[in-house]
Amino acid sequence: MRLSLVPLLSRPRRLPNEHSFIRYISSSGSRPSSPALGVARSAPTLGHLPNTQSPFTVELEFFNSVGRPIPTYRVLDGLGDPLENATLPELDENYAKKLYEHMQLLPALDNLLYNVQRQGKISFYMTSHGEEAAVIGAAAGLQDDDEVLSQYREMGVLLWRGFGLDAIMGQCIGNENDKSGKGRQMPVHLGSPAHHFHTVSSTLATQAAHAAGVGFALRRTPERRERSIAVCFTGEGAASEGDFHAGLQLASTIPAPVLYFVRNNGFAISTPSTEQYHGDGIASRGPGYGTDTIRVDGNDVLAVLIAVRAARKRCLEQGRAVLVEAMTYRVGHHSTSDDSFAYRARAEVEDRKRIDNPLARMRRFLESRGWWDAAAEAALKARLKSDVLTAFKRAEMVPRHPIGELFTDVYGGEEPWNLREQRAELTRLLKKYGQMWEPWRKELDKFREQGRDLTEDK
């Protein structure tokens, strides 16, 4: 099997012809029997549209995207065995174990934080169940100084970069270990300038346009233009937003080195992908922007790793956008605010967990090489569960930032009048009710200085 990104229509004002059509190479290496975009059957004597390579034709012919279903790149089958003729990435035992351990860390975190949200200890949470290979494979395929603009299931990228459990717990609880948001963001809306991870926004697809700007800035920065790219993570649901199209259009025409990684997990909250688009997934949109594109099996961590490495290389070499669509399945609910069994059958979820499990696939791959066994599996899960639980208990004991931090870090220069008014109003309420009303008194005890940074005269 050969890895082939879809060659783009690389030059401005170049329209499709027999030499610039999108090509897809199958696992056998054969080419499709008919052109992807419907080559006009015209006589050479009719000439071309001026300043283009588009031949004139007298035949009325419509075309509709690619000429056949877009293939999905994979190297491991569902049992974790390499496919015939597949090229595996170079990886030793330690690196393969690192991939698997980070994949297993995600459900260990998800199980605990989902449950503590149900206990009222955090306000919100979103899991990555079923998408572990897509997230960790992509993280491993990037460089640590690539600028990441993510959605909200990419916690694994930060973990791969060494963000740490204390930082994860600090952000979800909102304590002093939350260095980027200081407790002012929703849980799992992570950010870390030190790890080149831009803070998550709840608003869908805003990061797609931002990533184009970040990529353009990198391209204009001499010390980084040959080294770093911007990476935009999003789901197929967010790809229906206008910002997604604006981002791809911008990054393909400026151009800017941006890798757009779309997790197609089958659902935009309750809307199945079958109702989100009529075309062939998200990958079919890339060629319309002249963007190199590949679809990859998102449950095959090694395939994702290879595809992202190759996509990143193209971003740097061409200085423009590349699109990767990772096909996976959202096993968990959309969030703690969702009950997915209201719109899909429980049996469907259980079948997907059994038939196409990314964790089981990678585990079998390790076992087939003698790098893993049942004892190692049990020891890993016990250790991760203990580490996660210990980190959460430790985070519960850490105070929150002073409550006055609520008004900082947003504006530079002189503080706006509206923030001064809001601070004065909160100060008045704290002085009046902070010590006499039990719910407020208990809540203030969780903040460093217990609100005195506002209520005491300085």
Image (cartoon, rainbow, N blue to C red):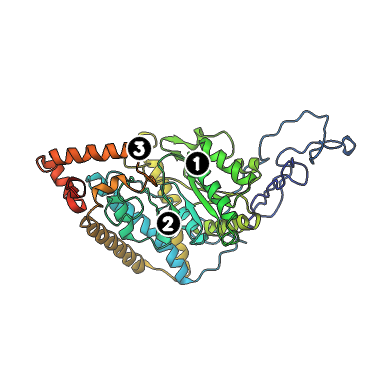
- Residue 88 x/y as whole percent: 56, 64
Mark 2: secondary structure: helix
> What is the secondary structure assignment of the residue under circle 1?
loop
Asked whether residue 299 is in view, the answer is: no
Kindly indicate whether the residue at mark 1 contacts the one at mark 2 (C-beta within 8 angstroms): no
Left or right? Give the position of 447 relative to 317: left
Query: In the rendered image, which residue does mark 1 sit on?
Result: 236
Q: Residues within 10 Å of mark 1 (few under 14, many from 20)?
A: many
Q: Compute the Cα span from label 2 to label 3.
A: 38 Å
Closer to the chain start, of discs 2 and 1, is 2
Quadrant assignment for the N terminus: bottom right
Disc 3, SS: helix
Pointer 2: residues within 10 angstroms few (<14), some, or many (20+)? Answer: few
What is the C-alpha distance between the residues marked 2 and 1?
26 Å
Which residue corresponds to mark 2?
193
Local crowd size for mark 3, using a 10 Å CA cut-off: few (<14), some (14–19), many (≥20): few
Which mark is nearer the camera, 2 or 1?
A: 2
Residue located 38% across and 60% down the image: 163
Q: CA distance from mark 1 to mark 3?
A: 20 Å
Relative vertical location of residue 336 with respect to residue 301 in this rendering, above or below: above
Tell me whether circle 1 and circle 3 mark residues in contact (CB < 8 Å): no
> In the depicted view, which residue is nearer to us: 159 or 50?
50
